[in-house]
């Protein structure tokens, strides 16, 4: 039994339920589950990546009609999430051809605001991973413009919360969907069925549908091919047709057209070649056993080297709840920035398995987003053979929803693989995400002061420093803190920055392996108060390796919030920046400061290279490739204000001039 489980649940009972959605490199298999048909326990979750629950209906003023069978939706979300499958709410549907509510909402800004807010609340309530808009169908002209405005607004609200926005669209002739919508959605589900009667969903019609949207400019990465699990004109399910004598290997039976196993497999291969997934209407219509169409789809997925298990691209951010398998854990709503859910009550022996696809073999910095009211947790990252790749120690962060990021460095081979997050020892720890970034000359690791693995004489307290949380205080001469398993990836110079506050000043020192390697003293200035924070630094030379890093109070009377260790080659190149500001030409270079970047602060890019008259193009995109900032400048300092809304995660900064271009990763904490 999980100790204190009921107490923890009581503490979070009033939180919004929201699931975030990482970006996966995977072949999507999306199945609709209607409220009126099918058993949640009969769903083949291992063969799916997403489930759309149908349907939620809007009112003309932006309200939502009561969802049918809410208990079924709750059970579906619970079962799907336990199997690593995302669940979206599908809004609209055919609805007897009545799309008047959508038309009214789309044409009225107040109703749109209400509708979007209600969908956010609904997703929170049912812990959903996103929203699927099934407006059948916006017309060309004003209706299309209104549809685009609605999708743009939904895109902002859903993606700001780390959730998916998708839409079901007509197979061909979709003039009611403007091309601008392509940029708002994560993907479109092409309803390549219902074209005629018995020949309503042929292979040729699937080809026509993909070609139509591809010709419009829809990327293959956002194209999902829809297939039917029913026949026309009788509207019988595939299972019913087989029960009447239809062959699973044919497409027509007594004048009823459907898709048998060969056609379904051909369409899945088509989707592999021309799109990024298969969508199914709907799962309850499938047969069981060897005749299952979903099984046929899965067979092709496996034959083509794909998987329906989400594979996180590395480098990239991995949401804790996106595990492929787990033992002993649960999920709960989180109050961490970005919302969603975290993995709950990670105890000794519990584990989470993740499927990842590593772009390039090498060293990666892994940031663990963790919280604990107890402390004393040791978390390990292991490979499929059980070897420990890296580990961290989690102290008392101040509460189950007081979040901190603790970094370590691991070495990973290239290619698809399984990583296990294992609790080697834990009296209780929550995990929200892991963030993988390349460990190179720009290596940085941030240690929260209170995340020590051992200490002498100190206490923790709430801090008013940027980012909140706790700091270590009540430091007297001789007190110390140690942080185990701190990895320095390469031999060389490292800058160690200490975040400190003191009314009268003091002195600290740092060391490795319990003082066997001394790193020297650093003076702490008088900052004017216990919560008036400043950053002091020292540059030292350290041999590559993993150490216990210690901070020692040579004198007392100061508070300590965090320490950041950065490969010195990534520190501010003051001379280079100065010459660039003077207009000197040279190789293009960019410095991102600070990196990692505390959320909610302005971000400075210092640019060097090119002539003083040559403009530089600056583009910042998030992990999904969505643009968040763009500027053309002849200046050599660019400041992204807090209003750029860089939420926690991995970003790519691209800078180019007329000669060359470069890319720089940015981690926002």
Image: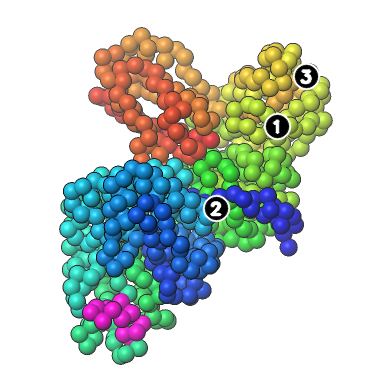
Q: Which range is magenta?
A: 230-242
Q: Callout 1: helix, strand or loop?
A: strand
Give residue 571's position: percent from left, percent from top. Answer: 51, 22
At 58% from the left and 23% from the top, the residue drawn is 495
Upstream in sequence: badge 3 or badge 1: 1
Relative side of 48 to 125, left or right: left
Residue denoted by label 3: 557
Give residue 202's position: percent from left, percent from top. Answer: 20, 72
Q: Callout 2: helix, strand or loop?
A: loop
Mark pair 2, 1: CA separation: 27 Å
Single out the mark in the foreground, 2 or 3: 2
Q: Which mark is residue 17?
A: 2
Looking at this rendering, what residue extends furthest in the bottom direction? 245
Residue 520 appears in the figure? no
Q: Do the residues under discs 2 and 1 have CB atoms within 8 angstroms? A: no
How busy is the neighbourhood of tag 1: few (under 14 within 10 Å), some, or many (20 plus)?
some
Relative depth, front residue between 387 and 634: 634
Residue 194 appears in the figure? yes
Mark pair 2, 3: CA separation: 43 Å
Upstream in sequence: badge 2 or badge 1: 2
Within the image, what quadrant is residue 512 found in? top right
Residue denoted by label 1: 462
């Amino acid at each position: 039994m999980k100790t204190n489980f009921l107490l923890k649940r009581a503490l979070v009972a009033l939180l919004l339920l929201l699931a975030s959605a990482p970006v996966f490199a995977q072949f999507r298999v999306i199945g609709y589950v209607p409220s009126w048909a099918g058993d949640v326990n009969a769903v083949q979750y291992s063969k799916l990546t997403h489930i759309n629950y149908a349907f939620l209906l809007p009112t003309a003023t932006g309200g939502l009609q009561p969802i049918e069978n809410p208990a079924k939706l709750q059970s579906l979300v619970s079962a799907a999430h336990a199997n690593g499958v995302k669940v979206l709410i599908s809004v609209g549907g055919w609805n007897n051809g009545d799309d008047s509510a959508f038309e009214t909402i789309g044409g009225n800004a107040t109703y749109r605001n209400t509708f979007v807010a209600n969908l956010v609340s609904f997703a929170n309530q049912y812990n959903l991973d996103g929203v699927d808009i099934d407006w059948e169908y916006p017309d060309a002209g004003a209706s299309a413009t209104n549809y685009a405005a609605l999708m743009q607004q939904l895109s902002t609200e859903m993606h700001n919360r780390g959730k998916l926005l998708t839409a079901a669209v007509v197979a061909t002739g979709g003039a009611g969907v403007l091309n601008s919508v392509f940029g708002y959605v994560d993907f479109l589900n092409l309803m390549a069925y219902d074209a005629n009667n018995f020949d309503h969903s042929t292979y040729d019609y699937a080809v026509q549908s993909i070609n139509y949207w591809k010709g419009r400019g829809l990327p293959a990465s956002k194209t999902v091919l829809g297939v039917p699990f029913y026949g026309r004109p009788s509207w019988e399910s595939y299972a019913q047709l087989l029960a009447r004598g239809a062959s699973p290997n044919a497409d027509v039976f007594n004048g009823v057209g459907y898709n048998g196993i060969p056609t379904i497999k051909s369409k899945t291969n088509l989707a592999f070649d021309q799109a990024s997934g298969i969508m199914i209407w709907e799962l309850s219509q499938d047969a069981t056993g060897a005749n299952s169409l979903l099984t046929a789809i899965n067979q092709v997925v496996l034959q083509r080297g794909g998987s329906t298990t989400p594979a996180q691209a590395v480098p990239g951010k991995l949401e804790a709840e996106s595990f492929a398998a787990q033992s002993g854990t649960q999920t709960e709503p989180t109050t961490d920035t970005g919302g969603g859910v975290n993995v709950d009550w990670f105890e000794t022996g519990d584990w989470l398995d993740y499927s990842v696809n590593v772009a390039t073999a090498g060293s990666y910095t892994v940031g663990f987003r963790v919280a604990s009211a107890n402390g004393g947790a040791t978390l390990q990252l292991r490979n499929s053979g059980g070897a420990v790749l890296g580990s961290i120690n989690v102290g008392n962060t101040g509460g189950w929803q007081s979040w901190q990021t603790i970094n370590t460095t691991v070495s990973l081979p290239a290619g698809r693989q399984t990583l296990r997050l294992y609790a080697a020892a834990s009296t209780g720890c929550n995990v929200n995400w892991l963030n993988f970034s390349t460990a190179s000359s720009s290596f940085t690791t941030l240690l929260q002061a209170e995340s020590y693995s051992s200490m002498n004489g100190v206490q923790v307290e709430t801090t008013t420093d940027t980012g909140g949380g706790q700091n270590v205080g009540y430091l007297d001469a001789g007190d110390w803190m140690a942080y185990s398993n701190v990895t320095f990836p390469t031999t060389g110079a490292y800058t160690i920055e200490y975040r400190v506050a003191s009314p009268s000043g003091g002195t600290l020192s740092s060391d490795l392996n319990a003082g066997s390697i001394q790193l020297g003293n650093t003076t702490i200035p008088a900052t004017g108060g216990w919560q008036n924070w400043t950053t002091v630094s020292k540059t030292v030379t350290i041999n590559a390796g993993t150490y216990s890093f210690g901070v020692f109070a040579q004198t007392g009377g100061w508070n300590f919030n965090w320490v950041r260790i950065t490969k010195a080659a990534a520190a501010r190149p003051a001379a280079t920046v100065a010459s660039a500001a003077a207009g000197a030409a040279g190789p293009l270079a960019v410095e991102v400061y600070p990196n990692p970047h505390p959320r909610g602060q302005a971000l400075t890019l210092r640019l060097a290279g090119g002539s003083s008259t040559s403009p530089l193009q600056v583009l910042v995109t998030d992990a999904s490739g969505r643009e968040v900032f763009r500027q053309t400048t002849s200046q050599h300092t660019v400041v992204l204000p807090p209003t750029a809304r860089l939420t926690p995660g991995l970003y790519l900064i691209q800078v180019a001039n007329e000669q060359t271009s470069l890319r720089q990763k940015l981690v926002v904490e």
